[in-house]
Amino acid sequence: MHNIRIKAALLLIYFIFAMLLNSVGIVILQVIQNFQVSKEAASVLEGFKDLPIAIVSFLVASALPKLGYKKALQLSLVLIAGASVLMPLFPAFDTSKLLFFCVGVAFALTKVSVYATLGLITKSKAEHASVLNFIEGFFMLGVLTAYWFFAAFMTEGSGHGWLDVYWYLAGLSLLALLLVSSTEFPAVELDPHSTGLKDFIAMLKLTAKPLVFVFVISAFLYVLIEQGIGSWLPTFNNEVLHLPSQLSVQITSIFAASLAAGRLSAGFILRFIPWHILCNICLLAMAALVLLTLPLTHEIQPDPDVTIWTAPLAAYLLPLIGFFMAPIYPMLNSAILTSLPQQQHAAMTGLIVVFSALGGTTGSIVTGHSFAALGGQTAFYLTLLPLALLILSSNGFHKLKPAA
């Protein structure tokens, strides 16, 4: 019963963060329409989320054990509850920046705490893998929920009614805070000699290895592509496919559903074929889908009576890229971690977080600027460039990887 309360708290927390972290694309669309913000300016919201995740994830390596995992979770929930309340009270683009900054800081605290806590409350590797997969699956449920939850508060044109969604998110955060505060977390004995400086040096030493260097390039490129598409898909649906804002967000949920389906399917497929073969199949399928779908987006005329059943075919096809995209990141991470000694996993995880965050920020900003300067179709066509580089780097990574 004790562990069930902890698991329930972790599930609820991850569900809340899934909605907040993956609302960047929705908020980009809304701030452009409601606060007269340019696409170039709106693109920085991804950076306000990802950079704090990268920086804080690294810094908490030494500070968090002294603070305690329970207190870290409490702090993160107070932070996002407060930031959520500010959104409807002070509707402005700067408030959106503050929100995602707080979300980034809070998620960094949360992710380290959740992963560390799982190691304390599970009795075996099998149970640990099961609980972790269930939590990550619940995260995807939160991502799917976010698109429909936010869309329910959205109306066409300017207006701040959509910000009322944050009252509910603040309420959920306070509910999670109450659950965490009323639950006893297990104590843990950690290495007293571990410091942020030592972790940083360990991370730098790892990047000197060719295998790790090529991996971080691959991870950076993957997240650049994923966030570039994911963050700007609602705006693409709205401005290129001429869908209403609410429908643009709702149809984007196909992208999240495709990501979930892709990861579940890959877990089964990888039992039969090597990871690098599946990786190449997925990358080539992504490129094919872009090349086949984007021509369908030209010369689409606005339809004031468009519904989810009558939207252009491209609105359904393009988000399916998530199905092929989804397995790549977990496969790369698993491949690098299983290639390194156990004692280097923590430092490697730090590198994964840092370069993923940097890739996400870069992808959103680059796509935003190219979207504004060249148009939505060209911006999405340009994803083929990092995609080609990822094919090269992932295959180079496979060749450097020691044989099993």
Image (cartoon, grey):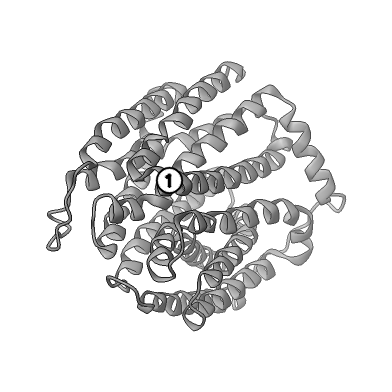
Q: Residue at x 72, y 50 (%)?
A: 58
Question: Which residue in the rendered view is the most extreme toward the front?
Answer: 373
Asked which quadrant contains residue 247, the reply is bottom left
Residue 285: horizontal and vertical position, in percent? 33, 28
Q: Is residue 209 visible?
A: yes
Question: Which residue in the rendered view is the most extreme toward the right?
Answer: 193
Q: Is residue 333 visible?
A: no
Q: Quadrant of the C terminus?
A: top right
Q: Residue at x 55, y 31 (%)?
A: 218
Q: Is residue 107 left or right of residue 202?
A: left
Question: Which residue in the rendered view is the most extreme toward the bottom?
Answer: 89
Q: Residues within 10 Å of mark 1 (few under 14, many from 20)?
A: few
Q: Secondary structure at mark 1?
A: helix
Residue 364: horizontal and vertical position, in percent? 49, 48
Q: Is residue 319 left or right of residue 227?
A: left
Residue 290: horizontal and vertical position, in percent? 31, 34
The foreground one among 28 and 166 is 28
- Tag 1: amino acid: Ala
Q: Is residue 326 above or below residue 130?
A: above
Q: Is residue 167 above or below residue 157?
A: below
Q: Is residue 283 above or below residue 51?
A: above
Residue wearing tag 1: 373
Asked which quadrant contains residue 253, the reply is bottom left
The foreground one among 163 and 6 is 163
Q: Is residue 59 left or right of residue 18?
A: right
Residue 261: horizontal and vertical position, in percent? 33, 44
Question: How many discs appear?
Answer: 1
Q: Residue at x 56, y 70 (%)?
A: 94
